[in-house]
Image: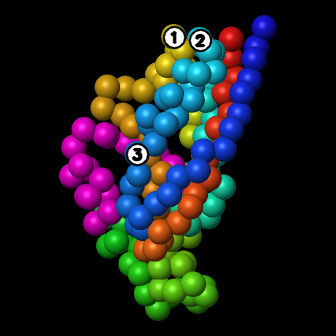
Amino acid sequence: MLRQNSMALEIETAGRGLVEVTQEVARWVAGCKIESGLLTLFLRHTSASLLVQENADPRVRADLERFFARLVPDGDPLFRHTDEGPDDMPAHVRSALTAVQLSVPVQGGRLALGTWQGIYLWEHRRRAHRREIMLHLIGD
């Protein structure tokens, strides 16, 4: 018989950058006692995103930040939506180019991530925020 669990995971960010949440998510999954299933993560914000990315070399995260800074620079005169500052609309664009939802298989009661993969919340705003990730696990 299929079972399901859900919860909200709150993450404090320090401003723009990638925050690894793999361990928090893995602990919660282990506590659910579901051996095989599918975990859905959904970020309830429009100026941050979720991604699975390499967690071994921090230069990968720094390179991603530099690439996005070039691709969607703060203060670009193209943008009219600047209510919360010059990083407001660029944060929305960065979120639109990435994702706010992930699906991760669960096998043997654990996240079925690859060797060098981690789950990250990517804060696109310059100032600190409290972000909420909804977790939903279904399986048996």
Please give the name of the residue rendered at 66% of the width and 55% of the height, measured from the top-left corner.
44
Please give the name of the residue rendered at 53% of the width and 52% of the height, measured from the top-left corner.
11
Amino acid type of the residue that numbered disc 3 sits on in the rendered structure: Glu
Q: Which mark is residue 20?
A: 3
Of the numbered discs 3 and 2, the one sitting upstream in the chain is 3
Q: Is residue 77 above or below residue 43?
A: below
Magenta stretch holds residue 105: no
The front one of 101 and 10 is 10
Across and down, in percent, residue 39 comes to 61, 29
**Callout 1: few (<14), some (14-19), or many (20+) C-alpha neighbours within 10 Å?**
few
Which SS class for mark 3? strand
Inter-mark Cα distance, 3 to 2: 23 Å
Q: Is residue 82 above or below residue 12?
A: below
Task: Return the residue at label 1.
Answer: 108
Q: Is residue 116 visible?
A: yes
Inter-mark Cα distance, 2 to 1: 5 Å
Left or right: where 2 falls relative to 72:
right
Q: Which residues are magenta?
A: 49-66
Task: Return the residue at label 2.
Answer: 35
**Callout 2: few (<14), some (14-19), or many (20+) C-alpha neighbours within 10 Å?**
some
Q: Is residue 3 above or below residue 54?
A: above
Of the numbered discs 1 and 3, the one sitting upstream in the chain is 3
Pointer 2 with pointer 1, Cβ within 8 A:
yes
Across and down, in percent, residue 7 comes to 68, 38
